[in-house]
Amino acid sequence: MTKTTGYNILVDIIVALGAFNYGFGFATFATSIGQPGFYEYFALDPTTSYTNSILGAVNALFFLGACIGALGSGPLADHIGRRWTIQIAAVVSAIGGALAAGSVHIAMLIVVRILQGAGLGALATLTPVYLAESSTASKRGMLTGLHGFFLVSGYNISSWVGFGCFYAENLTFGWRGPIAFTCIPALLLAIGCIWVPESPRYLLMRGRPDDAWRNLQRLHRDRHDPSDSAAHEEFVNMKAQIEFEREQPSGYLDILRIPSYRKRAFLSCFVQFAANNTGALVINYYSVILYGNLGLSPSISLLMYCIYTLIGALGNLFSLLTVDKTGRRFALLTGFTGVLLALIIEIAMLAEYVPSGNLAGTKVAVFAIMFFVFFYGLFIDAASFIYSSEIYPTNIRSRGMALATLTYFVACITYVTPGAVAIASIGWRYYLLFMCLTVITIIVIYFVYPETNQKSLEELAAYFGETVIVDTDVSHGKSDHGVGSRYGEKNSVEHAERMS
């Protein structure tokens, strides 16, 4: 079996900066709305419904841009490559961040957040695609899990930047500074991509096997295997499967039309929607407001947000180190069960004790929020993106992941846009929705989701009744019969009939 190399890890860390960019850029506004200078500069009263509506509009249009970026990045990545598309998206997000930091009117901020959202939406889509395609089967969870870890690390670094800027003497810098800093990781990613090799699976899909072999050899070269026999075995299997897949339909409509593709899309999109059904982004985005409602001061509210995102980042780090051992189903089921318990505790505290100023109830409510992010970061964040990206065949992976992230952003719009108004008007009752949806999620994952752990991307076709060209015995080092399994030969005709 192919070993994961230090070079492979280094390349994936550079690409994972795309996830950091998204996390940092997304979360920055959450800290900016905790800065007194933001409301003063734009002449907004933080206690009015009008201000809550403005905040909702800024968030909604950011996610609209993210939807556009996600949908556009899928076909673009298939046309010009994963690496180039990531590089372009990084430049777009840097320009959007610079313009947002220089906004002189709330309308300007709303418009340029669309541009920034487009770049960041593309990065959120393609980062896990590249990580999955460049990884070995044995460590795909770890390497693709870098997406979740870097994303939440972006949240965390952004929160500490916002906390530091809270004490700036210049109140305008307090909110402009964090937004301006979003340009730095975007530019680092754009520069770093110069040295990143193109995805070998993409190159095979484009009919460039020689280039694909060179890049795979670089990524998976093992100094204990001077003849590159393991990498060559991986390449032969990969090439056979992708040469078959590249002849199959690959458009957005084809994903919805073909039953096996549609099932993959459901699994990929549902887990992204389910992650938001927990209320995670509402809690994250409006946590500063939520802590204020619990009676905490503005500075302590920002500090609590820093701690919240730090727990999430550490949870993601532990997750990427363990998910290849525990499997995806265990992680998702454990995570959603844990956040359900946290939601129940939070709702009980907000309904019964916090309104009366009960100190013990307030402490338990804060604990429930931290308990929530512990389970979300440790078991859901990384695993959901891993599952969404690995479930597709190469010919539809970028478009399929675009649909998954589109679903993610639609859920963001659905829950985050009315979040400020809902929290102010109905309070804890808003979280009842997330509690009920999380119960449904647990049931669906338990009965519908197959385990994908320790399988090559090409082998997963067997779960959907599709042709498997690779010999699974060869790919696991159990046979010397070569490529072209009996399973693939037996099912190719009936699969072709289904595809037609």
Image: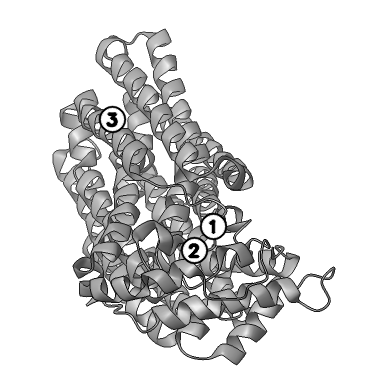
Q: Amino acid at mark 1?
A: Lys
Q: Is residue 265 above or below residue 162?
A: below
Q: Is residue 17 visible from the viewing direction of this image? A: no
- Who's the residue at 29% across and 48% down the image? 273
Judged left or right of residue 288, residue 416 is left
Q: Quadrant of the rendered structure where residue 102 is?
A: bottom left
Q: Which residue is mark 1?
A: 455
Q: Earlier in the sequence, mark 3 or mark 1?
A: 3
Q: Nearer the viewer, residue 113 or 451?
A: 451
- Who's the residue at 26% across and 77% down the image? 251
Quadrant that contains the C terminus: bottom left
Q: Which element type, helix, strand or loop, lies under badge 1?
A: loop
Q: Nearer the viewer, residue 115 or 373?
A: 373
Q: Which element type, helix, strand or loop, lies under badge 2?
A: helix
Label 3 with label 1: CB-CB less than 8 Å = no
Judged left or right of residue 237, residue 445 is left
Q: Is residue 494 above or below residue 45?
A: below
Q: Which residue is mark 2?
A: 459
The picture places residue 141, in percent across and down from the top left corner, at: 56, 53
Label 2 with label 1: CB-CB less than 8 Å = yes
The picture places residue 375, in percent across and down from the top left corner, at: 47, 33
The picture places residue 114, in percent across and down from the top left corner, at: 28, 67
Mark closer to the observer (3, 1): 1
Q: Earlier in the sequence, mark 3 or mark 2?
A: 3
The picture places residue 408, in percent across and down from the top left corner, at: 31, 54
Q: Quadrant of the rendered structure where residue 26 is?
A: bottom left
Q: Which residue is mark 3?
A: 439
